Structures are given as structure tokens and as C-alpha cells.
Image: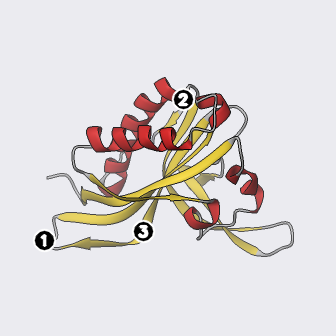
Amino acid sequence: MNYLRTNNIGVDKQIAEIQNILYNELIVKWGSIDAYGRVYKNINIDSNGKDIIIPQVYKSQGEYSNDVFLNDNVNGTFFFINSDETYTSDEITYVTDIKIVFQLNLQKTYNDRNDSLAQNDVLLIIKNKTWGKFEIKNIQTGLKNILSEFSIDGIKNFDFHPYHTFSVNGKLTYYLKEC
């Protein structure tokens, strides 16, 4: 399912456009997937009473959801993490670093350990369909690398076959308000 936010402006407007493109293209390749927009870095308390940071998607009216990670009901999932810094040189156009995080079950999506094909499919969609708004800088693998700001205790197994987690990292250009 494509979980789109409504009334988007600024960075969320551009993320929603890319989210829609990726969802529409990847659902054909991967089958059932869940697509989320930008996640927030929120503090939660673990079972030991310790503060942990988890990725959550804003739903509405102060409600957040933790359901951004892959689950058995879908073949894949993706979401966006933005940098804590945004830059501008003209006070009109803004640029921020973005990670698009993908988690998939390779057995369900490609019937094989074809992680390179999964990455290639995503890269081609971004390159050919985002019209210069997202500049790809690198690909990252490994949960500890990709989600270094978050607690990953409950999802450590997503680094082992048949699961594959990777992110496409780059720069996203957007307008704070539409001109």
C-alpha cells in the first residue's frame, strides 16, 4: 500500500512525488509493497526502560506509526530519511541529503539472491523518472550503516538471506513553497 501524506509542501511534496513514482514502478516488479514518506526520529522506551530512537511516520493529529519495516504481509517496503540540515544559496531552492531505505524479501521478489538486480531496478527508476530532483550519490548496505541513528534491535534479521536492506542516498532539491 502507498501511504501518502496529504497537503504536502517543501521537502514532503518532493518526497511524495518520488514515493509515488517508486511505488507505481516497484509494485509491478516486486508485487505487494508498502511505501512510506519521510520518517521522523522519535524517542521511545524499550523493554528495559532505556530511551531509544525509532523511525516513525506521521499519520495525522499527533499520531505516529512504527510500521515502516518489512513484515510478512508484503514483499518489500521503503521509506525516506532526511538529513537534519538543509542548504540554500538563493532562499528559493533548497537541498537536503536523503536516504531512501528499501527492505525486501529476495525470495518473494526475485526468486533468488539477486540483490544487485534489486538495486539496479531502483537506481534506474530514480535516474530515469525523478527528473533531476534527486541526485544519486551512493548506495549503502547493512542495517547498522543505513539506520545508524536508530535502534535496530527488533529487525537485525533483515540483514540475512532471504532479506536485503539497502538505501539509495542522494541530494533532494525542492522549494520551500511552490512558486
Position in image of residue 155 (x %, y %): 73, 54
Assign a secondary structure to mark 3. strand
Answer with mark 2 or mark 3, whichever residue precedes in sequence.
Answer: 2
Foreground residue among 137 and 52: 137
Res. 44 mark:
none
Query: Around disc 2, counting alpha carbons within 10 Å, would you say few (fewer than 14), some (14 to 19), or many (20 or more)?
Result: many
Point 37% across, 52% down: residue: 12
Left or right: where 50 falls relative to 151: right
User: In the image, which disc is placed on residue 90?
Assistant: 1
**Residue type at the position of mark 3:** Ser
Mark 3 and mark 1 in contact (Cβ < 8 Å)? no
**Pointer 3: what residue?**
83
Residue 35 in the image, given as x and y percentages of width and height? 51, 40
Point out the tag, 1 or 2, that comes first from the N-terminus. Answer: 2
Mark 2 — residue? 30
Q: Amino acid at mark 2?
A: Trp
Residue positioned most to the right: 48
Disc 2 element: helix
Picture coordinates of residue 142, whole percent (x, y): 61, 60
- Count of numbered badges drawn on the protein: 3
Q: Is residue 87 above or below residue 14?
A: below
Which quarter shows the N terminus? top right
Contact (Cβ within 8 Å) of mark 2 with mark 3: no
Q: Are marks 1 and 2 in contact (CB under 8 Å)?
A: no
**Amino acid under label 1?**
Asp
